[in-house]
Image: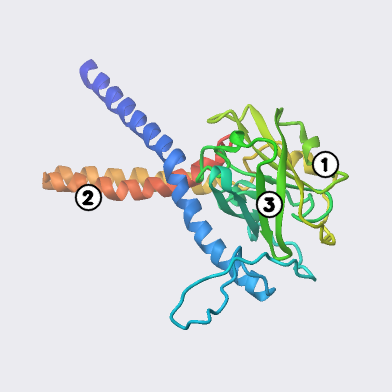
Amino acid sequence: MTIRRVLRAIGVALLAAGVLVMLFVAYELWGTGLTTASHQNALRQQFEQELRAHHVSSTTTTVPPKDPGSTTTTTMPITPVQPAAPPAAPGQPIGIIDIPKIGINYVAVQGTDESDLEKGPGHYSNTSLPGNPGNAAFAGHRTTYAAPFYNLDQLAPGDPIYVTTTQGRFQYNVTQTMVVDPTDVEVLDDTPTPTLTLTTCNPRYSASTRMVVQASLVSPVVPAVPVKKAPRKQAVAAQTELAGTTASFTGAVWWGLGCALFALVVLLVHRRLRHWWVYMIGAAGLLVLLFYFFGQLSPLLPAGY
């Protein structure tokens, strides 16, 4: 093998690596949003069914019009319903977070592992529930997985935040925004007054610090639903990083090998048939495989942005 062939092989390998990195960045910024959108559609339907089961409407209730041909709807406030359902299982819908100022309307789930945050904002399971006494805290991605908290920095004191659960629809008003170190988990401690705390990575495209938005409840407080408190050391370990610990290294390896094997098959077929369309079909198939491979690889990274 000549030096020219060696250099050519190295060049091709570096070019392929560069393309893979670019594709992975595109997946992180836009592809992950497709995953979240799919989860959100399913979660919204599930949560709406749970609301109906507890005789709670969404933000509006349709009132039968006097004129049968009319489609007029009347907006009515949600009345808190008791007793409340038990706390949701990890990854299951817990409520809807609505922030009109920055266009946020996401179904939040229970838990803050990476697999939970891929679905939408996640509720710190050892904090209070919205509308209850104490501190109800949520985490959310800033730039990936549909970036629900992308514009959290635009909130100012007095801005309303609405959270709908099976207990009712609650309004919080923003009181402060701050940037803290990832280890400053004191912002998740119980508070003497009903509080909502939202956390996300900061600055954008980084996880070096955390942005924290806190808001005070202005709606009536409902009786507390018992929440199982985790031991302090365990709670700190789970709350210092938005990235989870449920990633599968084995899954990433198998999907990576599958992508490499598929690319090799496409190359061999092209050498045999010598038709341009082999590469076209192969590229489409490889992109699909890479999507699933990146989905397994992303949670293995040290930071979930």
The residue indicated by pointer 3 is: 111
Q: Secondary structure at mark 1?
A: loop
Rendered location of residue 190, percent (x, y): 84, 44
Which residue is painted at 33% across and 25% down in the image?
14
Dot 3 alpha-carbon crowd within 10 angstroms: few under 14, some 14 to 19, many 20 or more: many
**Residue highlighted by disc 1:** 189
x and y, in percent, of residue 209 in the image: 66, 28
x then y, percent, for residue 281: 22, 50
| Marks 3 and 2, the one that precedes in the sequence | 3
Q: Amino acid at mark 2?
A: Ile
- Front: mark 3 or 1: 1
Q: Is the Cβ of the residue at disc 3 closer than 8 Å to that at disc 2? A: no
Work out whether mark 1 precedes mark 2 in sequence or the reverse, and give the earlier one. Answer: 1
Q: Amino acid at mark 3?
A: Gly
Q: CA distance from mark 1 to mark 2?
A: 54 Å
Residue 171 falls left or right of residue 155: right
Colour scheme in use: rainbow
Closer to the camera: disc 3 or disc 2?
A: 3
Mark 3, secondary structure of its residue: loop
For image coordinates 18% across by 48% down, the residue present is 278
Report the quarter where the C terminus lies. top right
Q: Nearer the viewer, residue 207 or 54?
A: 54
The picture quadrant where one finds residue 207 is: top right
Q: Is residue 254 visible?
A: no
Q: Earlier in the sequence, mark 3 or mark 1?
A: 3
Cα–Cα span, label 3 and label 1 = 16 Å
Neighbourhood count class around disc 2 (C-alpha, 10 Å): few under 14, some 14–19, many 20 upward: few
